Amino acid sequence: MYSNSRRTVLFPLLLAAGVAAGAAFGIYVGRHTAVPQLFRQPVPFDNKLTQTLSLIENQYVDPVSMDSLAEHVIPLLVRELDPHSVYIPAEEMAAMNEPLEGEFDGIGVVFNMATDTVIVLNVIPNGPSDKAGIKAGDRIIEIDDSLVAGCKIPQNRIVRRLRGPRGTTVHLGLERQGIPDLVQVDVVRGAIPIRSIESAFRISGTTGYIKLGQFARTTSLEFARALARLRAEGVDRLIFDLRGNTGGYLDQAIAVANQFLHEGELIVYTEDRDKRRMHEYADGSGAVQDMEVVVLIDEGSASSSEILAGAIQDNDRGTIVGRRSFGKGLVQKQIPFIDGSALRLTTARYYTPTGRSIQKPYTVGDDESYEADLWNRYRNNEFFSADSIHFADSLRFTTPGGKTVYGGGGIMPDIFIPADTTDITPYFVEVAGRNILYRYTIEYADRHREALNAVETVEQLQALLDSDKRLVDDFIRYAARKGVAPRYGDIARSRRLIEAQLKAYIGRNTKLEDTGFYANIYPVDNAIVRAIELLNTPKNDD
């Protein structure tokens, strides 16, 4: 999206109108001056915009690159439609589409640059780096014989140098613990899968947890596999975490919703400019139609996430827990241009099964106010109190089970969970904000690399981390050496949060990756804790 002001947006339109007006003025004065015959007759176009572009291309005093002009004008025109229609230049298309396509070409490592050095956190099994012998804990010092460590090179530039067409080779110089010289490795780039499901594991008893980061092309297949794996572990109830999921492919949201709903239940319907509707119903093939489910949402859950949450809520199929979602009820169609750019154009609105549109209000051309909505929610105390959230009676709807739901501004959860700042103290803000907490976990992983690399399951990870009774105290001494003196009152209050974050980041440094993170952070996550309580509470069949 672009952040130009409305005045800037209107400028090319006014310019176009000015050129057209100039043409009319030319017709008038043509009787008295030497004006070419072209201007004595109306130009045969059906709208002024087409006419203006043609005049500029054919009559402007200097040659004009129409492609360059279009790159400036089209984004401004699209901004006059709605907040979600957008023009994507050709050079940005790959980056925009990559998270949704399911794979990219690269070397297959997860890395971080917390200390201005590329630290390999994990190596994708059977990927190019794994085959080349790269290990978790390696530091990438050189890329193609050029020094990259300690050079303050932006991470996106490092990414560009490591990625490239599959089949090409990148030469790396690695610093490896216990080896005095750089380890030289050639990696042949290959196809690297992108997972939309960040984590799936048995979180408590027979309760499973799935964290879905986005709705990508492979989401429904990934979800089905995750469900099958959890079922094999004895899971019979599910926490489905859609917090921070900004959406993605509509068909994938429909396919995932179909897993939960019974045959004939409406998932979503869309309506275009001509009031034509397209309805999507569950086909009865879902693998978890009777599994009890809690869906987690927050203000970062948008679009396809809201479609799925709305389908679950409106069919009385599960419980929605968290905070009010973003409020995006517009459907975009991506229309490619021959130069590789594309237009994502809003072509319909979607409605939940009860008939509610959850699109929040917007003023055409005023993207600034639209984008400030979440900040305004925070200022109005909506993140902390459900009583601060108000819906008009005209937006009230009723589910088949008699539950009241509202449209017009996101999905309101059945159970509201306020943002929790209880354990956040000045000490915690400083050690986290200065990245001291995270850097400690990198150094911890280096010291315990052999044990961490041996971890295969969540249970093994928990046992390893629980055996270290000095973890927090050792971190406090580390932070003091980095310039943050202990504040024991703050530490007592934040200790549980600090310990959870330390374990979570260390867990992410194992083969478990994000599962190692979520398996350790959830005890201080009030939404997940509440979801577990709900699923463990015996149901009254009356």
Image (cartoon, rainbow, N blue to C red):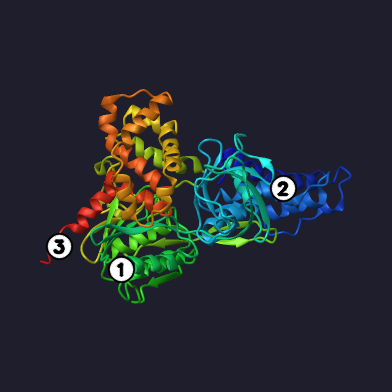
Q: What residue do we see at 34% from left, 28% from top?
A: 427
Report the amino acid beneath label 3.
Lys
The quadrant the C terminus occupies is: bottom left
Residue type indicated by callout 1: Arg
Q: Are marks 3 and 2 in contact (CB under 8 Å)?
A: no
Select label 3 or label 2 by which is in front. Answer: 3
Q: Which residue is mark 1?
A: 231
Tell me the residue at 28%/27% (across/down).
Answer: 490
Q: Which mark is residue 539?
A: 3
1 vs 2, front mark: 1
Looking at the image, how many numbered discs can be counted on the residues? Answer: 3
The amino acid pointed to by label 2 is Leu
| Res. 36 visible in picture | yes
Q: Is residue 445 left or right of residue 91?
A: left
Q: Earlier in the sequence, mark 1 or mark 2?
A: 2
User: Where does the image place residue 90, in percent across and percent down from the top left?
Assistant: 66, 54
Please give the label number shown on residue 69. 2
Residue 52 percent location from the top left of the image: 72, 51
Q: Nearer the viewer, residue 281 or 215?
A: 215
* Residue at 37% over, 51% down: 516
